[in-house]
Image (cartoon, coloured by chain):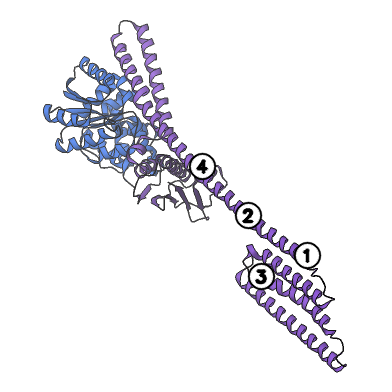
Chain colours: A purple, B blue
């Protein structure tokens, strides 16, 4: 596509070319007519010269005419104009010749037939393509919706699993280890049995720790209980430089987005602690236009490699949620990570 | 000592009650939700309440909220929170009151009966009992602290045990050293971290916690 000003200049050129062509043709036509007059005005032969001059002019005009149409209709207009020129030429040849039966009729009908076919094709092709586009758009909408639905369901299930781990299996293990502890206290006179019970208690204790780590990896309870801002503060307690959380969230994002955002913040803070130890970090949370916006900024040395492992992992996590990430990390000016996650 | 217990899981609650009774602790009431806690405290005036974090109806953080609320009405009441997990935000909220008699332990610590009873006693007497995981979180947040780097490994251990709320005797027992040695470590820690010395055990613990949580 040409820029507008170039297109306009080009159209002006077309106009002047047509005008010059017309002027030259008219001049030549007048000249031969003059010569014919001066040489005794016999048979009116200049009509054939006129005819010869008119054909290229008509073709030129057809081209110019077709350019006046929108791009989609341009070729059809050119086709129609040329058909008109050819038909007129045939009629003129017939009129200037011997006359007799109107032989140009059949070719003209054929030419018009071709125009009709062109018209039909171009119209239906357009409709055909719009139809395909519509079907595809609907399909994409449907897939986007169902994908979000699936992710939502998955997130809800994972939170349920986390809850069940804490309140189900883990609680039973706690009760078990407590009973074992009581049994242990009653077995002072049987050292071997006491040792076995003590080992069983230790095993139960390890199982509890494993379950807790597992549950925490799914989603920390504070996220489900209090939301993203509090969970970000909780993450921030592990950063040596101090983390400030500023939130202007107006409502809680869907669980899948919330959990995704949580792990984005967690990874960003881990990165900051690793590459900018001791630097203050600010986490800003906001929403609007159906999006959750995160900004994680540290006052560290900057110069983060966008292709490094930490940032690549982050990028994949965000892409899975159909979100966008921007990383700005000039040397000596800290690192800013901006993330937008769609919520609808 | 008179204790009430709020825990929605009957198996666990009854286990804890049995354990406490076997060890001479008087359990005067049991409940399974937050309104139950307030009712029990108003009705029985116990020395302390043992409260689960997750309670009906939403199973989120009702226990923490109810505990903070009931403490405002009954400042002398000791609160021991039992939880399936360590959450720094909750620790801060519990400690923000500044008063004594606060504990936050992982549930599985009940299996170490002597330590659990020790924690209950400390909280009932207005002291502190923080899970070592809670303390580890607090210390991790201050890892880059240059003053903490100056501590010897032994002093770091003493600091952590102190932050858990252990008394000098308790620390001496845990590290298998004399209480004189513990006192020496503690005064070294306080001078390195620039903390005000003196005061009772519990005030000292609060100074350490204050330092770990907030100081710059």
Q: Nearer the viewer, mark 3 or mark 1?
A: 1
Query: Spatial distance from mark 2 to mark 3, Cα to Cα?
Result: 22 Å
Q: Are marks 1 and 4 in contact (CB under 8 Å)?
A: no
- Along the line of sight, the residue nearer the viewer: B10 or A154: A154
Q: Chain of mark 1?
A: A
Instruction: Report the residue at 82% width, 78% height from top.
Output: A96
Q: Would you place residue A289 above or below residue B146 in this image?
A: below
Q: Are marks 2 and 1 in contact (CB under 8 Å)?
A: no
Query: Spatial distance from mark 1 to mark 4, Cα to Cα?
Result: 54 Å
Instruction: Report the residue at 15% width, 33% height from top.
Output: B76
Secondary structure, mark 1, is helix
Question: Can you give x and y, in whole percent of width and height, for residue B82 in the image?
Answer: 28, 28
Residue B146 located left or right of residue B14 = right
Q: Nearer the viewer, mark 4 or mark 3?
A: 3
**Residue bearing mark 1:** A107
**Residue bearing mark 4:** A143
Q: Nearer the viewer, mark 1 or mark 4?
A: 1
Residue B95 located left or right of residue B148 = left
Circle nearer the N terminus (1, 4): 1
Query: Spatial distance from mark 3 to mark 1, Cα to Cα?
Result: 26 Å
Write down the quadrant of residue A83 in the picture. Answer: bottom right
Circle nearer the N terminus (2, 3): 3
Please rate how many residues cluster around mark 3, counting C-alpha atoms within 10 Å: few if below 14, some from 14 to 19, many from 20.
some
């Amino acid at each position: 596509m040409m820029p507008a000003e170039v297109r306009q200049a080009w159209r002006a050129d077309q106009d002047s070319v047509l005008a010059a062509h017309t002027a030259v043709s008219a001049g030549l036509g007048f000249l031969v007519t003059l010569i014919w007059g001066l040489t005794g005005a016999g048979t009116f032969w200049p009509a054939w010269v006129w005819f010869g001059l008119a054909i290229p002019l008509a073709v030129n005009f057809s081209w110019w005419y077709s350019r006046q149409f929108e791009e989609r209709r341009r070729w059809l207009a050119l086709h129609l104009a040329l058909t008109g020129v050819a038909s007129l030429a045939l009629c003129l040849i017939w009129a200037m010749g011997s006359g007799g039966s109107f032989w140009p009729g059949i070719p003209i009908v054929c030419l018009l037939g071709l125009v009709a076919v062109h018209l039909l094709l171009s119209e239906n092709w357009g409709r055909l393509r719009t139809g395909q586009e519509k079907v595809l758009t609907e399909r994409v909408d449907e897939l986007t919706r169902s994908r979000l639905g699936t992710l939502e369901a998955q997130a809800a299930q994972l939170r349920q699993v986390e809850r069940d781990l804490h309140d189900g299996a883990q609680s039973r293990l706690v009760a078990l280890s407590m009973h074992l502890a009581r049994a242990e206290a009653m077995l002072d006179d049987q050292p071997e049995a006491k040792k076995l019970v003590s080992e069983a208690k230790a095993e139960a204790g390890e199982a509890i720790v494993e379950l807790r780590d597992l549950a925490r990896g799914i989603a920390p309870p504070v996220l489900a209980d209090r939301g993203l801002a509090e969970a970000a503060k909780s993450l921030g307690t592990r950063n040596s430089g101090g983390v400030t959380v500023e939130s202007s969230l107006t409502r809680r994002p869907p669980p899948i987005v919330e959990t995704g955002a949580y792990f984005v913040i967690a990874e960003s803070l881990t990165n900051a602690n690793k590459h900018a130890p001791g630097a203050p970090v600010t986490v800003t949370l906001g929403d609007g236009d159906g999006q959750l916006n995160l900004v994680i900024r540290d006052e560290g040395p900057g110069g983060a490699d966008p292709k490094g492992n930490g940032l690549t992992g982050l990028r994949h996590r965000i892409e899975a949620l159909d979100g966008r990430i921007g990383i700005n990390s000039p040397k000596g000016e800290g690192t800013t990570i901006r993330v937008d996650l769609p919520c609808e | 000592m008179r204790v009430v217990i709020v825990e929605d899981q009957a198996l666990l609650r009854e286990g804890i009650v049995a354990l406490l009774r076997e060890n001479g602790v008087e359990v005067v009431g049991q409940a399974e939700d937050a309104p139950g806690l307030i009712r029990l405290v108003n009705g029985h005036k116990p020395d302390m309440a043992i409260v689960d974090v997750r309670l009906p109806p939403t199973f989120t953080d009702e226990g923490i909220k109810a505990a903070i609320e009931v403490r405002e009405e009954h400042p002398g009441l000791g609160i021991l929170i039992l939880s399936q997990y360590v959450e720094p935000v909750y620790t801060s909220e519990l400690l923000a009151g500044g008063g004594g008699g606060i504990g936050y332990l992982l549930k599985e610590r009940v299996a170490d009966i002597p330590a659990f009873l020790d924690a209950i006693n400390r909280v009932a007497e207005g002291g502190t009992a923080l899970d070592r995981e809670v303390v580890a979180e607090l210390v991790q947040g201050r890892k880059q602290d240059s003053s903490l780097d100056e501590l010897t490994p032994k002093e770091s251990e003493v600091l952590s045990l102190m932050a858990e709320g252990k008394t000098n005797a308790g620390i001496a027992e845990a590290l298998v050293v004399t209480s004189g040695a513990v006192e020496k470590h503690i005064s070294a820690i306080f001078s390195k971290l620039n903390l005000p010395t003196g005061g009772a055990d519990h005030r000292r613990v609060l100074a350490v916690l204050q330092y770990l949580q907030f100081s710059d």
